[in-house]
Amino acid sequence: MNAIDRLAETIAARKGADPESSWTAKLLSKGPEKCAEKFGEEAVEAIIEAVKGDREKLTSEAADVLYHLLVMLAARDVTLADVLAELARREGTSGLAEKASRG
């Protein structure tokens, strides 16, 4: 099991936990909208570091983005397995064709 799988499992385990016991539980207790907002903030921070060209800070922000993406997904009961299945479904399809199929 890799780090992202372990992280997804930890996040799932924190669902419904006492918000005072865990940052993840606290985020999830605030609802999907707050989780989405936090994901957006982290994504913007990663974009800023990508533009600046600071590799170390971008790496750190990217880790935050992945964590907050998984929290946002969990808030809407979407699992990492769901996302990986969608990626597998798209595998071998031209990115241009896939995008066109979404209208």
Image (spheres, grey):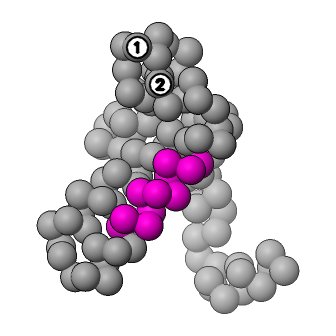
Q: Please, what is the three-letter code of the amino acid marked with disc 2?
A: Lys
Residue occupied by mark 2: 26
**Cα–Cα span, label 1 and label 2:** 7 Å
Question: What residue would you read off at disc 1?
Answer: 20
- Secondary structure state at the residue bearing disc 2: helix
Answer whether labels 1 and 2 touch (C-beta < 8 Å): yes
Q: Number of numbered discs present?
A: 2
Q: Which picture quadrant has residue 24?
A: top left
Instruction: Provide residue 93's location: percent of width, then percent of height.
Output: 64, 79
The question of residue 41 being in magenta is answered with: yes
The region drawn magenta spans 36-46
Under mark 1, the amino acid is: Glu
Q: Earlier in the sequence, mark 1 or mark 2?
A: 1
> Could one spot residue 78 in this view of the protein?
no
> Which residue sits at x=71%, y=81%?
99
Is 59 in the magenta?
no
Quick check: 10 left or right of 103? left
42 with respect to 90 (left or right): left
What residue is drawn where x is 84% and y is 80%?
A: 103
Asked if residue 103 is positioned above or below residue 84 in the image, the reply reads below
Dot 1 lies on which element? loop
